[in-house]
Amino acid sequence: MAFRNPRLSLYVHPKRERKVVKVGDELLSEYLWDQTKTIRENTLATYFAQGIGKGDLDPTAFGGYMVQDSVYCYNVKRTIDVAANKAVDEDLKTFLQEESKSYESYYQNLFEKWHIKDPTGIDLGPASQAYADYELKVASEMNTIYMIVAMIPCQKLWPWLGQQLQMQTTDHGVYTAWFNANFDPTYTGYEELDKMVDAAGTCINRETALDVYTTCMEGEYEFFNSAHAMRLSL
């Protein structure tokens, strides 16, 4: 059984009328997505993404990634708590609190599945550690709306990867259940986060948002790209 990834959130953010931010004729969310096209295409080409799609990913690479992702999600839950505690906007605070619950449930399930008793006993690789550290910095030092900006790349990238991989094949072998729970090509929940960013008005700066968004999209790429097939030394 594959547990539904909290990156594919099912929580719907309450609607509120706010000023929509546009960059020329583009919504800010569209601009951020368009500016990171090369990074997501590089992510699609990684050994991990292609291996999941084709069903031939080295199980050792998958296991190594999943153990790290379990602890990464443990860290993200705490990062989201930092952002939620800082949030002044009640809608934003509620959204982050719901996301925190989702991440907590997910990492607890993964801890049980991968027999993780103490997450502090697991060293994250440089890519996942750098990604987690950056998100904590965003949550701790920046306006809370930038935590939403930081969360969009993974929530939007993963279903996009699913869409691209489904065009190559619909048979993902032993990874089919994981694919459906994580790379669900039908998922559109990220649109709620896009709307939050587009409606942030003067609370958000385009250049700062692009820097956060790009860094987190690069974090996704680097984390996926850190997974490699096991090579035995003779």
Image: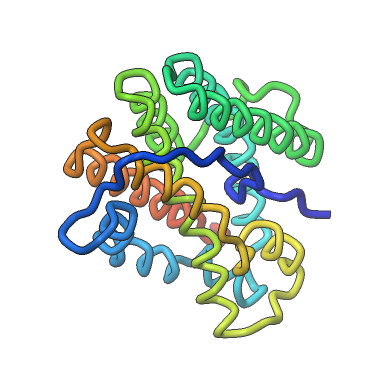
Residue 204 at x, y = what percent? 26, 35
Q: How many marks?
A: 0
Residue 234 in view: no
Q: In which quadrant of the rendered view does residue 117 lie?
A: top right
Residue 135 at x, y = what percent? 40, 31
Q: Residue at x 74, y 75 (%)?
A: 173
Quadrant location of the N terminus in the rendered image: bottom right
Q: Nearer the viewer, residue 36 or 112?
A: 36
Residue placed farthest to the right in the image?
1
Residue 141 in view: yes
* Colour theme: rainbow
Left or right: 124, with 145 as reference point: right
Q: Residue at x 56, y 32 (%)?
A: 95
Quadrant location of the C terminus in the rendered image: bottom right
Left or right: 11, with 72 as reference point: right
Left or right: 207, with 19 as reference point: left
Residue 180 at x, y = what percent? 70, 64
Residue placed farthest to the top in the image?
85
Residue 88 at x, y = what percent? 42, 17
Residue placed farthest to the bottom in the image?
168
Q: Residue at x 19, y 55 (%)?
A: 23
Q: Nearer the viewer, residue 138 or 19?
A: 19
Q: Tell me if residue 216 comes above or below residue 34 in the rendering.
A: above
Q: Residue at x 57, y 26 (%)?
A: 94
Q: Nearer the viewer, residue 215 or 174?
A: 215
